Image (spheres, rainbow, N blue to C red):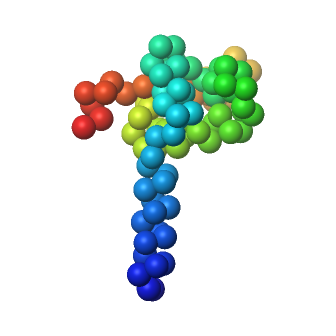
Amino acid sequence: MNIRQMWLIDREQMDSLRLTTHRVKVITFIRKNPDCTSKSVSIVFKISLANSSTLLIKLTTLGYLKRRQFDSISGGIEYSYRAIPLRNLT
């Protein structure tokens, strides 16, 4: 692996950690509306349910959100999300 390839890998990792304006808006929305679901985020931000789920999973993986599993009325499993308080991010 050459230096350019290593730089590209590091850059991709850094880009995945960066909070875009859209991600900040989603975190802010969830902070104001705890226990949001992917569906509510998709409706508010006018994105597909698949994109909403992917975004929320990404923010959970990065440590900005907590995810809680619950049984849906239809018998399946759903997840709700809460923003982690800022003091816990450091």
Q: Is residue 15 visible?
A: yes
Tell me the residue at 44%/85% (across/down). Answer: 2
Residue 84 location (% of width, % of height): 37, 27
Quadrant, the C terminus:
top left
Q: Position of residue 48 (x, y in %)?
A: 75, 34
Residue 16 percent location from the top left of the image: 49, 52
Residue 37, image x, y percentages: 60, 23
**Relative to 84, residue 31 above or below:** above
Q: Quadrant of residue 7?
A: bottom left
- Count of numbered circles in the view: 0
State which quarter of the image contains the N terminus. Answer: bottom left
Question: In the displayed image of the protein, which residue is found farthest to the bottom?
Answer: 1
Residue 81 seen in render: no
Nearest the eye: 45 or 76 = 45
Q: Is residue 38 left or right of residue 24?
A: right
Q: Residue at x 49, y 31 (%)?
A: 24
Name the residue at 73% across, 26% down: 46
Q: Residue at x 43, y 25 (%)?
A: 83
* Observer-nearest of 61 and 14: 14
Q: Is residue 13 above or below residue 1?
A: above
Taking 32 as reference, is 11 above or below it?
Answer: below
